[in-house]
Amino acid sequence: MIKKIKRRFIIYNMLVISISILILAFAVLIGSDQPISLRRWLVTAVIAIIVVYISSQIISAAAIAPIKEAWQRQLNFTADASHELRTPLAVIQTNLELVVGNPQDTVAEQSQWLENSLFETRRMSNIVNDLLLLSRADSETNLINAETTNLSLTMEAALRSLVPLAAPKDIVMQSNIQKDIYLHGDAKLLTQLVVILTDNAIKYMNSPGSVNISLVSQGKEIILKVSDTGEGIAAEDLKHIFDRFYRVDKSRSRDDGGTGLGLPIAQWIVSSHKGSIKVNSTIGAGTEFIVTFPKA
């Protein structure tokens, strides 16, 4: 597909440049009083063809690069999504085959296989929802329902819903949220951003520990920080954490339902609100995400 597009670009560019050169040559010929030999015409034509071909290759390569990149990204996305969905589908199939293979058993006796299937179904549903969101984001569909939002209240509500996740792991959640900080943005997506960053901190925390969340207004910026006292992220992993489907701890994140799509979604939410996100991490000392939004 890409090769066909590139060939069309080259042919189109060669035609355009050739016509331009012919027009220029014709204009020069008309304005010249000196006769032009056949040899000179041939040499000029050969040089013109070479120049046209090289120019077409350069122009086509430059024009096709964004398309090639988008195409490759789409291929990678499809391959990763297929790989990610294959596991829950296989688990569901295996467990349901066990149920079907024992028709004499009661629902209670089959509960383990049914619960496994239900867990994987929910995980697959989360993956599909995340994939749809990122796919729409890639297509530049307007997903932002922007309005003046009290970010302070939005964060407080989101954090309250996460306390039950931290308590069983003996993790203390500490917050320092400045009152009445307003941002022109999508309250639903901003809530999702806070949940993703805080849930990740809880998920990858060894017990006991603490997660600290702060929201402050400084000058022309609004700064959100989510830090933890966890195990930290290695430098080689740090540069990939916003890649889709990338997992720092692959085995554990699969067990707890992680999809490797949370941080890419968080990054998209931040960029959609014209903000920036960066991460600092030290092995054995913890990780800190810093999100900066410009004030309206």
Image (tube, rainbow, N blue to C red):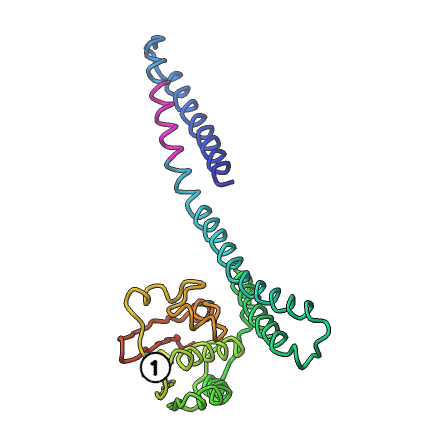
Residue 49 in the image: state x and y as whole percent.
Answer: 38, 23
In reply to whether residue 188 is colored magenta, the answer given is no
In the image, which residues are magenta? Answer: 46-57
Can you say whether 117 is above or below 223 in the image? above
Secondary structure mostly seen in magenta is helix
Q: Looking at the rendering, which quadrant does residue 231 occupy?
A: bottom left
Can you say whether 29 is above or below 245 in the image? above
Q: Is residue 230 left or right of residue 145?
A: left
Residue at image coords 48%, 49%: 71
In reply to whether residue 49 is colored magenta, the answer given is yes
Residue 78 in the image: state x and y as whole percent.
Answer: 52, 55
Q: Amino acid at mark 1?
A: Ser
Residue at image coords 49%, 85%: 158
Can you say whether 281 is above or below 2 in the image? below
Q: Looking at the rendering, which quadrant does residue 250 occupy?
A: bottom left
Q: Is 23 or 205 nearer to us in this picture? A: 205
Residue at image coords 38%, 91%: 172
Q: Is residue 217 left or right of residue 165?
A: left
Q: Secondary structure at mark 1?
A: strand
* Residue picked out by circle 1: 227
Residue 213 in the image: state x and y as whole percent.
Answer: 38, 85
Q: Looking at the rendering, which quadrant does residue 281 occupy?
A: bottom left
Residue 91 in the image: state x and y as whole percent.
Answer: 57, 66
Q: Quadrant of the C terminus?
A: bottom left
- Residue found at the far right of this picture: 104
Q: Is 279 or 84 nearer to us in this picture? A: 84
What is the tally of numbered marks visible in this picture? 1
Residue at image coords 47%, 89%: 163
Q: Residues within 10 Å of mark 1 (few under 14, many from 20)?
A: many
Q: Is residue 279 left or right of residue 158?
A: left
